[in-house]
């Protein structure tokens, strides 16, 4: 089944359910639709603040390594943090090695 079909079907079911609940309140879905559209577009425009996506220095250095993994190692991803923004991550991969990520 195509994702578009499922989205359209969910929209139709939602509209039917909402439309059944609104008449006792003297409101119809045709009146609420434009209001919902305006409230949906309003916050979207506020997300793009001036200078929000400008590049900035984060004072972070990340090194990625591939290291050998012992045969008895499990599939658990280990992530350790220390003071001063330091961390190390050991993540097994599907190639029989482990990915080591060091952040300073």
Image (cartoon, rainbow, N blue to C red):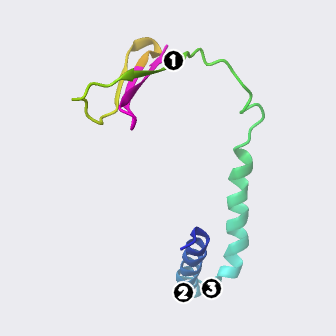
Q: Point out the tag, 1 or 3, that comes first from the N-terminus.
A: 3
What are the residue bounds of the magenta stretch? Answer: 88-104
Nearest to N terminus: mark 2 or mark 1? 2
Tag 1 residue: 63
Q: Nearer the viewer, mark 3 or mark 2?
A: 2
Residue 30 falls in which quadrant of the image? Answer: bottom right
Where's residue 26, x and y in %?
A: 62, 85
Compute the Cα span from label 2 to label 1: 57 Å
Front one among 57 and 36: 57
Between marks 2 and 1 in the image, the one whose residue lies nearer the viewer = 1
Camera-side residue: 77 or 60?
Answer: 77
Identify the residue shown where x is 66% and y is 17%.
57
Residue extending farthest to the right is 50
Q: Position of residue 53 (x, y in %)?
A: 72, 33
Which SS class for mark 1?
strand
The mark closer to the camera, 1 or 3, is 1
Mark 3 and mark 2 lie on one chain; the one further toward the N terminus is 2
Q: Check disc 1: other Cα within 10 Å, few if <14, some if 14-19, many if 20+.
A: few
CA gap, disc 1 and disc 3: 62 Å
Residue toward you, 91 or 24: 91
Q: Which residue is mark 3?
A: 26
Q: Is residue 52 left or right of residue 88?
A: right
> Residue at left 72%, top 55%?
42
Q: Which residue is mark 2?
A: 20
Q: In the visual, does 91 lie left or right of 32?
A: left
């Amino acid at each position: 089944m195509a994702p578009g079909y499922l989205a359209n079907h969910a929209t139709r079911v939602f509209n039917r359910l909402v439309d059944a609940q609104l008449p006792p309140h003297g409101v119809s879905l045709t009146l609420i639709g434009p209001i919902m559209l305006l409230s949906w577009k309003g916050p979207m425009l506020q997300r793009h603040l001036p200078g929000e996506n400008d590049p900035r220095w984060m004072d972070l250095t990340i090194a990625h390594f591939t290291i050998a993994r012992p045969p008895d190692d499990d599939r658990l991803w280990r992530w350790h943090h220390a003071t001063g923004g330091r961390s190390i991550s050991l993540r097994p991969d599907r190639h029989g090695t482990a990915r080591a990520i060091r952040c300073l």
